[in-house]
Image (cartoon, rainbow, N blue to C red):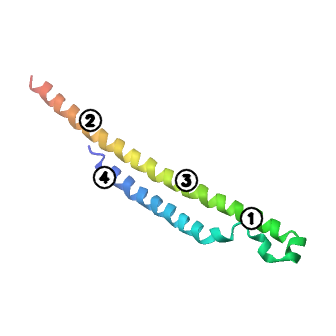
Amino acid sequence: MSFQVQSETLRTHAKLWAGHATDVQSAQTTVSPGIGMGDDFGYLAGLNDVADNYNTWSHAMDQALTDAANCFKYLDAALNSAANEYDDSDATAATNSTQLDKMIGE
């Protein structure tokens, strides 16, 4: 029995999550110049709390993108870690089988 197929599948999925993290970081770079720029809406917008609401929203969006990127990076690392554990299990199973085969021959 081998875990190789499962470990390669995990690594494939890890790459997908790493790609999502890159996509989120790219989006964050695109929107970051506008974060907290509510005053650009003008004086009347400021009187009606548009600027404050925009600033609150844009900072929350920035935090959400940061959290998403961190979560996606974590999933990438966790899936790769699980794949490495599967690979280690294969090595352990192979060693144990070899030792068992020797014991049968005695």
Q: Amino acid at mark 4?
A: Val
Residue 30 location (% of width, % of height): 59, 72
Mark 4 and mark 2 lie on one chain; the one further toward the N terminus is: 4
Q: Earlier in the sequence, mark 4 or mark 3?
A: 4
Amino acid, disc 3: Cys
**Circle 3 residue:** 71
Given residues 9 and 64, the one toward you in this image is: 64
Q: Which comes sooner in the sequence, label 1 or label 3?
A: 1
Q: Which residue is mark 2?
A: 92
Q: Point out which mark residue 57 bears.
A: 1
- In this rendering, the label closer to the viewer, 4 or 3: 3
x and y percent of residue 91 in the render? 25, 39
The amino acid type of the residue labelled 1 equals: Trp
Question: In terms of sequence position, does the residue under pointer 1 or pointer 4 come before the other?
Answer: 4
Q: What is the spatial separation of the Cα atoms under label 4 and label 3, in whole angstroms?
A: 25 Å
Query: In the shown orientation, is residue 66 left or right of residue 101?
Result: right
Between 84 and 57, the one lying in front of the other is 57
Within 10 Å of disc 3 (Cα), the crowding (few <14, some 14-19, many 20+) is: some
Helix, strand or loop under label 2:
helix
- Which residue appears at 40% of the width and 45% of the height? 81
Measure the C-alpha gap from mark 2 to mark 1: 52 Å
Residue extending farthest right: 47
Residue where numbered disc 4 is placed: 5
Q: Give the CA separation, mark 3 to mark 2.
A: 31 Å
Residue at x 86%, y 71% (from the top left corner): 46
Give the percent coordinates (x, y) of residue 26. Answer: 53, 68
Please identify the residue farthest to the top as the structure is shown: 106
Q: Between marks 4 and 2, how big is the CA–CA gap? A: 16 Å
